[in-house]
Image (cartoon, rainbow, N blue to C red):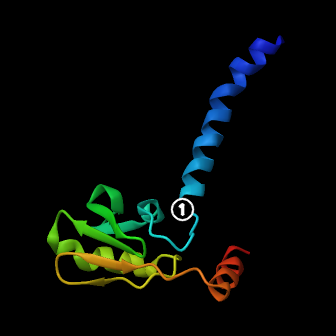
């Protein structure tokens, strides 16, 4: 097998690994609000587990705040519940139309707590 054949054979798998790594690194918590932090949240949408990004718009209006606005306003409670149930340690609140998620600053204590969650 020539070098070009090996590269041709392995390139799609390498590209898949790189893309997966990019998605995972985007969810790393730095103490700043990033919309990618909520990419893995699944919401019970009328009995079907649906990615949050498919049923709401997510914004970072401030460095320490994320907002989620479901397109179907009746799902605000389900979105809040899904975020609260995630392993992100976030404490969302809603006003009936919008879910606000304050992002706590990344202190030494929070870093240690997050490191324990990983292991």
Q: Toward the viewer: 12 or 92? A: 92
Q: Quadrant of residue 107?
A: bottom right
Horizontal relation, residue 34 to residue 111: left or right = left
Give x and y (percent) for residue 60: 35, 66
Q: Is residue 46 visible?
A: no
* Identity of the residue drawn at 36% across and 82% down: 92
Q: Toward the viewer: 67 or 13? A: 67
Which secondary structure, mark 1?
Answer: loop
* Tag 1 residue: 27
Give x and y (percent) for residue 59: 32, 64
Categorize mark 1 by other alpha carbons within 10 Å: few (<14), some (14-19), many (20+): some
Give x and y (percent) for residue 82: 38, 75
* Identity of the residue drawn at 16% across and 66% down: 72
Q: Is residue 112 visible?
A: yes
Q: Of all residues shown, which one is farthest toward the bottom?
A: 109
Instruction: Tell me the quadrant of the picture where the C terminus can be found.
Output: bottom right
Q: Quadrant of residue 28?
A: bottom right
Q: Of all residues shown, which one is farthest toward the front?
A: 63
């Amino acid at each position: 097998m020539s070098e070009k054949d090996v590269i041709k054979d392995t390139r799609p798998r390498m590209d898949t690994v790189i893309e997966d790594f990019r998605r995972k690194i985007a969810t790393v918590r730095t103490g700043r609000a990033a919309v990618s932090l909520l990419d893995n949240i699944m919401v019970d949408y009328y009995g079907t587990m649906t990615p949050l990004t498919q049923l709401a718009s997510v914004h970072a209006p401030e460095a320490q705040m994320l907002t989620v606005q479901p397109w179907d306003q009746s799902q605000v409670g389900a979105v809040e519940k899904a975020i609260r149930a995630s392993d992100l340690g976030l404490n969302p609140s809603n006003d009936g139309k919008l879910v606000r998620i304050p992002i706590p600053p990344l202190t030494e204590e929070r870093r240690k707590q997050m490191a324990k969650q990983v292991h």
